[in-house]
Structure formats: C-alpha cells, structure tokens
Amino acid sequence: MSTNPKRAHRERAAAKPQAVESVADMTLQTVAGAMIAIGVIAFASALIRGAAAIAWEAYLVNLLFFLGVAQGGVVASAAFYLTQAKWGGSTLYRLGEAFAPFLWVGFFLFFGLYFGRSAIFPWVTHPIAQKAAWLNTPFLFARDGIGLGVMAAASFAFIRVSRGDDARAWTIATDDIELPPHSIRVLAPLVAVLFAVVYTLISFDLVMSLAPVWRSTLFGWYFFAGAFWSALTAMALTAVVLRARLGENNLFTNPIVMHDFGKMVFAFSVFWVYLVFAQYIVIWYGDLPVETFFVVQRVHHMPWSPLSVACLALIWLIPFTALMSVRAKKRPLILGSVAGLGLVGMWLERYVLVVPSLSLDAIPFGLTQFLISIAFLGAFLISAVPGLNRVAQAATSGEPFGDGAE
C-alpha cells in the first residue's frame, strides 16, 4: 500500500469508476443527420442540373478542412505526450482525440473525388506530358488513399494506447517526471512524422495540382501547420462550450486551463503567419511568373483579394490582438469568439487555396456550397459524439491535473 499521499490519491483516481457525462442528446444527432441529408440532396441536385464544378469544389474544400481538424487533433494529443503536458490531465488528451472518427469518414469520402476528377483536376482533361508520370488518376488516388489509410490506422492505434490505463495513470501523475509508456513513445512520434509526410502529399496533390504549373517547396509545411492550428482552435472552442454545458467544477472552469488553451491558439496563430511570410518572401525574391501567379491571383486580383485579407485577419490579426493579455485568454467569451472566428478563417483559407485555381474571376459560393458545407459539418459532429462524451467524463471526474493541482 502506498505511503505517499499524493501517489495514493493518484492511484485511487486512476482506478475509480467514472460517472459518464453525456454532451450529446438525440436532438443534436437528429439535427446533424438532417444537415447531412439536406447537403446530400443539394449535392445531387447540383450534379443533375449541370453544376458539377461548384458541387465538387465545395466537396473538396470541406474534405480538406474537416480532415485537417480531425487529424490535427490526434497530432495535438501526440504532441502533448511528446512534450509531457499534464496541465489538463487526461481530459486534454481525450479532447485532442475526440474528432478522430472523422478520419475514416474522410478516408472514404476522399475516394468520392474520383467521380468528380474531371471537374476539379485540370490535368485530367488537359494532361501535362512532363508531369504525366506523377499527375495521373490511378497513381494519385492510390498514393493519397494509402497515405490517408495508413495515417488513420496509425492514429487509431495511438488512440487505443492513449486510452489505456497506463497512459491515463501517467497523465494524472502530477508529482513525477517519468516518461510516458513505451508504446506511446513509439506511436506518438510516428503519428507526428506521418502527419507531416501525408499532409504535405495531400497539399501537393489536392491543392497545388489544381494549378499544375505552380510549385512551392514550403507549401506542405504551411498546409499542415494550418490543419494543426484549426484543430487547436476547435479544441479551444469545444472547451468553452463544455465549460458551460458540464456544470460547476468541471475542469474547463479552471481559469488556468483556459489560459493554456488561449496560449496555444495565440502561439500557433503566430507560427501560421510566419509560414505565410516565409513562403511569400521566397516567391517575391524569386519573382518567377511560374511561382508568383498563384499569390498574385489571390492577393492582388479581385474578387479574391478581400477574402485573402479576411483570412489574415481571422487567423492571425484577431487572435494576436485579442489574446495578447493573460486576462483575455482566461475569458471564455473572448477565447470562444476568437476560436470560432479562427475556424471560419481557416475554412475560408482552404476555400481561397482551392477555388481561385478553378474560378479566376468569380466567387462561386451560394446556397449549394453552403448546404454541402453544412452536410460535412453534420458528419463531423456525429463522428465526434463518442469522443466528446469521453471528454465530458474526464472533465467531470475530479482527477488531478497540472503542477500543484492536488
């Protein structure tokens, strides 16, 4: 029997059964199901009436955005293990992993792009001889499909270990600096490295190939950093919502925890804008038409220029100014608003990356694109319900977290 009071408390917390809290009722799931149904009808209607291009553009934008949020959350959990983060106990890890079920949904939705390939990939109808070995339909869907499948499988192997007793006991061990379990130390780096490789590949194949003569060696870093930040903002927004929904004394009512979420949103917003500048300055110095046209079209060409400015404001300027102070980071209203606007900004950024390559002089956004986006949101919400219930269970369990929390 342990004679160390802190260790004994930790062992009791790790062993005691948890009261399951539910954050999703049938109303939410019914609404999400209706969102999916309406979006599917809108998508099918667009195909029938000959508006396949706008339907598939919206499909691709939302696939990239929601896959990024789901995968970025798993990578965030892996990063917390690698940095030995214990400021949120096991709740922090459950929150990062809550969005993961959408990875398999997105994996299957990716293959749906095969049926819209001629509407969104210009090299399908106008092959480029010099790039035909890389830009061809069988090879693209094979390599990206394998990459997404391996990424999802590795993510769920990691999550299975992360939800085990050993990993949970480690996350609430606030009085030592022991390394995470061995299996975590193997799988967490694997997930992080695969994320960089696979999402760089996705950025090249599903975004850069829409303007097949354009190239940027920094684009992969920029793309997966945006996905990671979108996951952090989704986690922060979820924390703010659960803070109000789970009643008193849940972990999210602790101002220190909210402060830490605010710091992550703030810091990686700055990192994102650094990558924007790093990519821009290289293209500006090179001043090669084959590189500059992609930026000029989005930054200096109407009607896309205002949207690019809006992305910069929503993803960097607003988080940077609103979350500068410690007090602002602890305020749920401020943090939640910044995170919500940041998610809108990151969706808009994915839209600006994809659509101008296919529509130079017009913004093709209307009811059809909105309803398709709503359908993806519904699928994402339904996928996240089991994970969010785990988050609620951990947040209300009363387990120790952080230095001095006991």
Image (tube, rainbow, N blue to C red):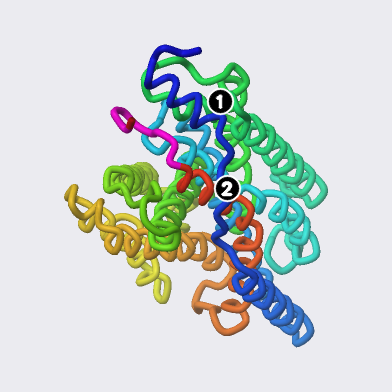
Label 2 vs label 1, nearer the camera: 2
Look at the numbered disc 1 and give the secondary structure of its residue: helix
Magenta span: 398-405
| Amino acid on which disc 2 is placed | Arg
Crowding near pointer 1: few (<14 within 10 Å), some, many (20+)? Answer: some
Q: Is residue 399 visible?
A: yes
Note whether 304 is above or below 403 in the view shown.
Answer: below
- Indicate the amino acid at tag 1: Pro
The one of 293 and 359 positioned closer to us in this rendering = 359
Q: Which mark is residue 390?
A: 2
* Residue visible at 66% across and 53% down in the picture: 102
Q: Nearer the viewer, residue 229 or 334?
A: 334
Residue found farthest to the right? 138
Residue 284 seen in render: no
Q: Which mark is residue 189?
A: 1
- Magenta span includes 49: no
Left or right of 403 on screen, residue 231: right
Residue 195 locus on image (x, y percent):
58, 37
Left or right, residue 245 beside residue 118 = left
Residue shown at the point (34%, 48%) measured from the top left = 265
Q: Is residue 216 above or below residue 170?
A: below
At 56% across and 30% down in the image, what residue appears? 15
State which quadrant residue 80 falls in. top left
Residue in the image at 43% along x and 41% along y: 398
**Residue 282 image offset from top left, x and y in percent:** 37, 42
Q: Position of residue 133 (x, y in %)?
A: 76, 42
- Measuring from the top left, give residue 43's x and y in whole percent: 71, 77
